[in-house]
Image: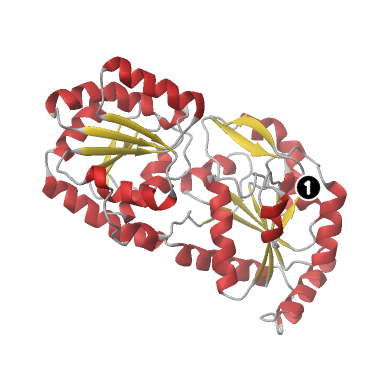
Amino acid sequence: MKIALVSPYDYPYPGGVTEHVSNLVVQFRNRGHEVHVIAPSSAGADSLEQMTHVHRVGRVVPVWANGSVARLNLPYQGYLQVKRLLSHQAFDVVHLHEPLMPALPLTVLRHSEAINIGTFHAYGRTDIAYFYAKPMLRPFFRKLHGRIAVSQPAREFVARRFPDDYRIVPNGIDYARFAVPREPLPWLVDDRPTVLFVGRLERRKGLRHLLHAWPTVRSELPRARLFVVGGGGRRLESYRRYARRQGWPEVIFTGHVPSDDLVRYYQSADVFCAPSTGQESFGIVLLEAMAAGRPIVASDIPGYAEVVTHGQEGVLVPPEDPPALASTLLRLLADPDLRCALGARGRRKAADYDWSIVAGQVLDYYDETIDAHIEPLAKVGARFGRVRRAASGVAHLLAR
């Protein structure tokens, strides 16, 4: 098939949706499909020349949304460029990520005559934007032939305003990358109890609650230490100053680390902690830690409960509850057998989320959706790209 993956976010700037799209590109190409990415990008000309499959549309603008800063383009930028691109490329499938976001996906969906698939990633405390924009977005929603949600919470979030059938296809991970043992980081080769946090330093990630729990942990286990991996800028410096004022040399903020070192941090920790307060549709960092064999202590929020079963791969605690967080961390740090059992179950479960499996589920859904939207006569020879493309066009004409 000839597939277009459409993202509203700065490509390939790091982010959950961007990494999702990037991994689908690799997996689809490995299966022989022709894959293009349509997205805004702040990458330099040299980088884009090497990414010949990327079609840059529009400028990148930072926008505050859902407790985070999203780097996306404004609505209807590149209107004519998108129209010409779709006409020239004649895609079999146009797969839009966050298809109702008022940005590039709406522009592409407006002009697409292919089979349109939408993946919904977001989950939030309120769907007020969907509520007010529903009359405007309803015609776009109807242009979607297939709908995917990355989790049950993500499905429920969009289905409240746009009820329909959604296929749950989760986010994925490169399982082997995190599961294959690496050489430990030199400064972690000892027997000190180690807690690891990985993520951006936004309020919804809940690091402040972990820091409020830390005095209890260190009073019971004076040799315990905490590594905070990720983040940068003023927030990182602010947290570092806070730890210095508290007299906590064992709380170490690494900032961003190289990809290989991130895996080694996971594998060197005793417990992985994710104290997010909400607005998480999924838990990719939980899967990464699970693939590395680490037991999880995480907030009991819908997106995380989708990944971790309480008492099986980890322990879920009430969000924004430092005493519960501290007592759970202490229990796991003091019980190596429990950590080992939780970690082993987590490693087995994470294998089901490898990108090779997830991409296969997406492609199967493409096939189901195409077959459901072409006339029986047009199904003849639908395994071949050119015939399938023609059949899709016939189906659109018949549907009008």
What residue is at 66 percent from the left and 53 percent from the top? 47
In the image, is 384 to the left or to the right of 226?
A: right
- Residue 269 seen in this snapshot: no
Residue 260 locus on image (x, y percent): 39, 53
Q: Quadrant of residue 26?
A: bottom right
Q: Is residue 29 above or below residue 120?
A: below
Q: Secondary structure at mark 1?
A: helix
**Residue type highlighted by circle 1:** Thr
Q: Is residue 373 above or below residue 221?
A: below
The tally of labels here is: 1
Q: Is residue 260 above or below residue 136?
A: below
Q: How is the image coloured?
A: secondary structure
Residue 104 locus on image (x, y percent): 73, 45
- Residue 198 seen in this snapshot: yes
What residue is at 31 percent from the left and 24 percent from the top? 211
- Name the one closer to the observer, 330 or 153: 330
What residue is at 54 percent from the left and 44 percent from the top? 15
Q: Residue furthest bottom?
A: 381
Q: How many neighbours does mark 1 have within 10 angstroms: few (below 14), some (14-19), or many (20 or more)?
A: many
In the image, is 376 to the left or to the right of 262?
A: right
Q: Which residue is mark 1?
A: 107
In the image, is 71 to the left or to the right of 205?
A: right
What residue is at 25 percent from the left and 18 percent from the top? 247
Image quarter in which the N terminus is found: bottom right
Image quarter in which the C terminus is found: bottom right
Residue 225 locus on image (x, y percent): 23, 33
Residue 281 locus on image (x, y percent): 48, 42
Q: Quadrant of residue 32?
A: bottom right
Q: Is residue 245 above or below residue 368?
A: above
In the image, is 252 to the left or to the right of 53?
A: left
